[in-house]
Image: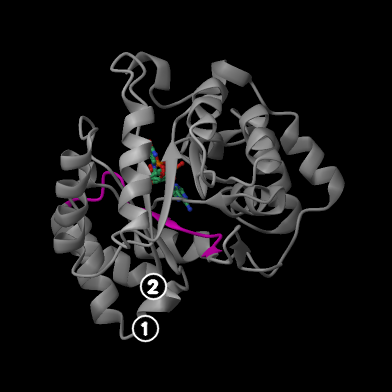
Amino acid sequence: METTITVPGGHRIPRLGFGTYQIAPHDTEQLVSVALRAGYRHIDTARYYRNEAGVGAAVQASGLARDSIWITSKLPIGADDTDDVNRAIDATVDALGTHVDLYLIHWPMPRRNRYPRTWQALRAAQADGRLSGIGVSNFHQAQLDRILAGGGPPPMVHQIEAHPHLANNDLRQYGAQHGIATAAWSPLGAGSVLRDPAIQSVARELGRTPAQIIIRWHLQRGDIVLPKASSPQRIADNAAVFDFSLDPHQMARIDRLDRGEEGRTGPHPERL
Ligand SMILES: NC(=O)c1ccc[n+]([C@@H]2O[C@H](COP(=O)([O-])OP(=O)(O)OC[C@H]3O[C@@H](n4cnc5c(N)ncnc54)[C@H](OP(=O)(O)O)[C@@H]3O)[C@@H](O)[C@H]2O)c1
């Protein structure tokens, strides 16, 4: 399996990303360094996580070529017009000490109803060369329709909650039809899916851990996957997913675990 996904425009995004939500600022450099040594080449952070500086320090200390690592970050909530967006980009680049490869609108905040304007501000920053890739997170289909109607290329990536208990197939298919790659956040259901008996059964069959089974399922569906872990052992374990595969029957058993909305573990995007 390819370890990267090629998106329109030719960028190659590493499919396995290290999630850093709830990794404390003082632990971030060490844990991202562990992740880079374990083979992750994509780090997912956000202004909101307060740990961009640790991400940047680890990337710098790794000695790896900067263009071999993909950094995704996200706009702070409430930054929605051109000045806010430009200030936020500056703050992220300062904290990282390097450019950001992909910058996302973190939440659409539908009650504020400013995301179409925010998307135009991101497009302008991209046109000025201040940003390379731009994308969105936590949108629903009508919101994606609205920003696509504004013209220009689609978001490079749509980052959404997705895991075996919330497969989110409608949004994934919409993305595939419109050239938008899907990235799965909380890919382990924030840990809850690890205990699912069907996952544990496939794990026993293959002599793999439940986390590896779930991460491999995401990869075989074609998504970018962003697991978070906070011990070096788990971080390395979750990266050892390119030397085995699930057969179609095992994939189908996991596909059947979808609970739709009942499986959601994070906030509902419409309620923010
Ligand atoms: N765009 C958005 O709005 C958004 C929202 C939420 C998350 N995200 C991104 O998605 C990333 C992942 O989501 P997440 O952190 O919510 O959940 P997750 O990756 O689905 O699950 C993380 C949980 O699973 C545990 N875990 C990980 N690997 C394990 C293993 N091998 N064995 C046992 N337990 C394991 C972790 O424990 P320990 O930490 O104790 O090791 C942690 O409790 C975030 O870090 C963030 O980058 C984005």
What's the residue at 30%, 72% (across, down)?
A: 33
Q: Residue furthest right?
A: 249
Q: Which quarter of the picture shows residue 209?
A: bottom right
Amino acid carrying label 2: it is Leu
From the viewer's perspective, is residue 263 above or below residue 14? above
Reading the image, the residue beneath label 1 is: 64
Q: Which quarter of the picture shows residue 235?
A: bottom left
Locate residue 58, reporting x and y percent.
Answer: 25, 72
In three-dimensional space, the C-alpha distance between marks 2 and 1, rounded to whole angstroms, equals: 9 Å
From the viewer's perspective, is residue 217 above or below residue 150? below
Tag on residue 36?
A: 2
Q: Is residue 23 magenta?
A: yes
Pick whichever, 43 or 82, lies toward us. Answer: 82
Residue 268 seen by the camera: no
Say whether residue 250 is left or right of residue 59: right
- In what quadrant of the picture does the C terminus appear? top left
Image marks 2 and 1: residues in contact by CB distance under 8 Å: yes
Mark 1 burial class by Cα count in 10 Å: few <14, some 14-19, many 20+: few
What's the residue at 69%, 28% (across, down)?
A: 257
Pick whichever, 203 or 263, lies toward us. Answer: 263
Amino acid carrying label 1: it is Leu
What's the residue at 54%, 30% (across, down)?
A: 149
Residue range (magenta): 13-24
- Going from the N terminus, do you reach mark 2 or mark 1 first? 2
Locate residue 135, reporting x and y percent.
Answer: 44, 45
Q: Which of marks 2 and 1 is in front?
A: 1
- In what quadrant of the picture does the N terminus appear? bottom right
> Can you tell me which quadrant of the image ligand 1 is in?
top left
Mark 2 burial class by Cα count in 10 Å: few <14, some 14-19, many 20+: many
